[in-house]
């Protein structure tokens, strides 16, 4: 046998060729499936994120203050410059009450209007403190709830607070972004009462507004 004969590769027989073709087909079909699955997963996740983002931006998801808001005692007392975290009107609705340095009491939803991160009170920032969202550096004015920096598209919804003679602080209703406390209380009362006659101070009625009426009820 010559050296050339020793290194000549043997010709594959028909059975080996069929086995190689079957293996090739299987690998091709596996990679097609994998690619298809991958594309489907990417499309599903991207679609979900896009729908979720649009829904949050449009306020289509659960909105703070949706539903009936019943009065709720949230603190025995809130000293100047301090805040209290609470849930209102529902157990999923995070909120914050703040006593400003001049004694003014304000309350807001603590859920950022950008992508729903938790908003935190920072008493040492600026002249009056600020409400800060750490997710994308959103900032809200502590006195009005309006956006002062960052990507949030609108101000924080309000929680309407009253203080009773014993110093306790009560949440009595909510107002959506851009709505005044009066408008928010009237909207909620119109959902509970039969008509303008049951909504003192609201459009169509002549008696004192709900906030005044609540203040008159202080004990
Ligand atoms: Fe608050 Fe983006 S979630 S700034």
Image (tube, helix red, strand yellow):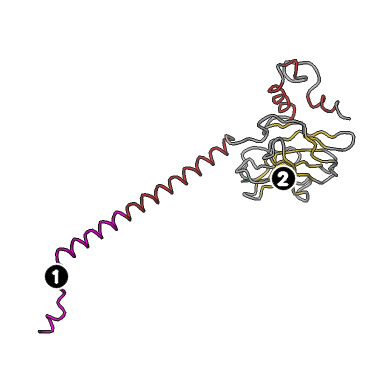
Q: Residue, x 63% and y 35% (percent of image)?
A: 63
Q: In which quadrant is the C terminus drawn?
A: top right
Q: In which quadrant is the N terminus drawn?
A: bottom left
The x, y position of residue 13, in whole percent, is 14, 66
Quadrant of the image occupied by residue 217 = top right
> Is residue 145 shown left or right of residue 164?
left
Magenta stretch: dominant secondary structure: helix
Residue 85 lies, with reference to residue 58, above or below; the image says below
Quadrant of the image occupied by residue 93 = top right
Q: Residue, x 75% and y 15% (percent of image)?
A: 197
Q: Which residues are magenta?
A: 1-29
> Is residue 134 shown left or right of residue 124?
left
Q: Which residue is mark 2?
A: 131
Closest to the observer, 117 or 30 = 30
Which labelled disc corresponds to residue 11?
Answer: 1
Q: Residue, x 79% and y 45% (percent of image)?
A: 83
- Is disc 2's CB within 8 Å of ligand 1? no
In magenta stretch: residue 54: no
| Furthest-bottom residue in this view | 2
The x, y position of residue 141, in whole percent, is 72, 41
Total numbered labels: 2
């Amino acid at each position: 046998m010559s050296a050339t004969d020793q290194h000549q590769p043997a010709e594959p027989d028909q059975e080996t060729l069929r086995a190689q073709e079957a293996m090739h087909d299987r690998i091709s079909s596996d990679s097609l499936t994998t690619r298809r699955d991958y594309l489907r997963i990417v499309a599903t996740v991207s679609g979900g994120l896009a729908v979720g983002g649009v829904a949050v931006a449009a306020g289509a998801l659960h909105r703070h203050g949706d539903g009936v808001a019943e009065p709720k005692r949230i603190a025995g007392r809130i000293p100047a410059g301090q805040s209290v975290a609470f849930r209102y009107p529902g157990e999923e609705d995070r909120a914050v009450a703040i006593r400003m340095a001049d004694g003014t009491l304000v309350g807001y939803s603590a859920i950022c209007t950008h992508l729903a991160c938790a908003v935190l009170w920072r008493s040492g920032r600026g002249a009056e403190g600020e409400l800060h969202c750490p997710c994308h550096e959103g900032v809200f004015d502590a006195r009005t709830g309006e956006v002062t920096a960052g990507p949030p598209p609108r101000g924080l919804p309000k929680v309407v607070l009253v203080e009773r003679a014993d110093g306790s602080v009560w949440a009595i209703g909510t107002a959506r972004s851009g709505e005044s406390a009066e408008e928010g209380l009237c909207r909620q009362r119109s959902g509970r009462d039969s008509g303008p006659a049951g909504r003192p101070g609201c459009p169509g009625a002549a008696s004192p507004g709900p906030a005044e009426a609540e203040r008159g009820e202080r004990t």
